[in-house]
Image: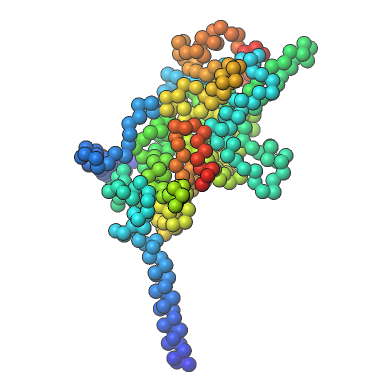
Amino acid sequence: MSKTTDQPDQDRRAFIGKAAGALAAATLAPGVFLHVTADAAYRQEPVTSKVRWGMLIDTQRCANGCTACVDACNHENGMDLLVKPEGLSDDMWDQQIPRWIRKVKVQDRATGVAANLPMLCQHCEYPPCVDVCPTGASFRRADGIVMVDRHTCIGCRYCMMACPYKARSFIHEVVEHKPTIAPRGRGCVESCNFCVQRRDSGGTTTACQDACDREGHKAIVFGDLNDPASDLWQALRKHPSRQIRADLRLNTGVRYSGV
Amino acid sequence: MHGCVLSKGLWAVLVLAGAAALVRPALAGHGQEEAWRKGNSKAAGLQHCVMPTEWMRRHHMELIKRERTLTVHEGIRKERYSLAGCVNCHVQYDAAHKPIAINSEGQFCDVCHEYAGASLDCFQCHARVPTPETDYGAHAEKGE
């Protein structure tokens, strides 16, 4: 590698500029090259804090025994491509397999009233996982999505310990099959990222929401917490909702109603 | 005995020549008749990459690194320079038209990285064959 510092190399920049110009000229010639197809749906500008993605989950609409959101999440993000390593017990595999959504049932002992809470990364405004990350791999994107940059994750799992929601998973084994949109490899931590590939390509929903709608439960509303016109904002105004472990003052992006 | 020593020397020369012949295909990746040019990848039919070929050989990792930060932290996924783009264009296909993993032996990435002795970590996490980017949850790679 010729590069020994992270400082920009001005000579190279100049060269890139010239080369890019030359290439642009080349592409103008009829039928020569067309490497990039402009796709308006894809994000062209960096994400900003004008948007804050969030979610409202109606726990009373979330049906007993239904796993549609979990299955859809597993499919979208390639978890269903993972294969149990040879020699690993079923028990151990069950503990190790990544889970971005866990269905938790809570019940009031006095009244017996129960609620289903699909628990996923709560996308906190003040995420403890980001606070404790020693490498800066765990970070909060400008639009509120809490993510792991796998390029800098060293797999220490400190964030997993810090998360009050048990939202993160660790990849223990070499991964053979992974889709282009959801890279995954051994030694990194991962969690729900609000289907970030959809956020950046013009999608308006998440895989879990789509699945829940398909099942007819419509328990999940996803949207922009900063946009008064969004479905999420409307739903939040209509139904009383709460943050799980609001006492921690993390200002979660995922809210629950009916619990 | 003297003759024996000579023949040993001759053998050494022959072995070296043989080794050189084995190394040649790897070296060819840096010559005019690139091994991958003969393949059936999309790139094989193009004049040059997103940048001049010579430049790409030395600096492709810088483009990929820049793009990775743009994508992960700023959400810009359809950049001119993307690893998915590299794979889409440079991957070759077998007789059954199935894509061959781009980092497998003798394939585009492997040829030079093997020659240069530079470890190739991208594909520990990233897909080694193209999978549809818009078909969320695309599972084409399973058939690899």
Q: Position of residue A47 (x, y in %)?
A: 41, 25
Of A155 and A200, nearer the camera is A200
For the image, the number of numbered tags is 0
Residue B32, relative to residue B68: is it above or below? Answer: below
Q: Position of residue A15 (x, y in %)?
A: 26, 44
Q: Is residue B53 visible?
A: yes
| Location of residue A102 (image quadrant) | top right
State the quadrant of the C terminus of chain A: top right
Q: Is residue A3 visible?
A: no
Q: Furthest-top residue in view?
A: A238
Left or right of A160 in this view: A144: left
| Nearer to us in this view, A51 or A23 | A23
Give the x, y percent position of residue B58: 34, 51
Q: Residue at x 52, y 38 (%)?
A: B139
Residue at 54% from the left image edge and 43% from the top image edge: B142
In the rendered image, the residue lying farthest to the front is B96
What colour scheme does the image use?
rainbow
Extreme residue in the right direction: A110
- Residue shown at the point (60%, 25%) measured from the top left: A69
Answer left or right for A74 relative to A34: right
Left/right placement of residue A10 relative to residue B119 reads left
Residue located at (69% from left, 49% from top): A87
Q: Position of residue B136 (x, y in %)?
A: 49, 31
Rendered position, B82 above or below A4: above
Quadrant position of residue A176 = top right
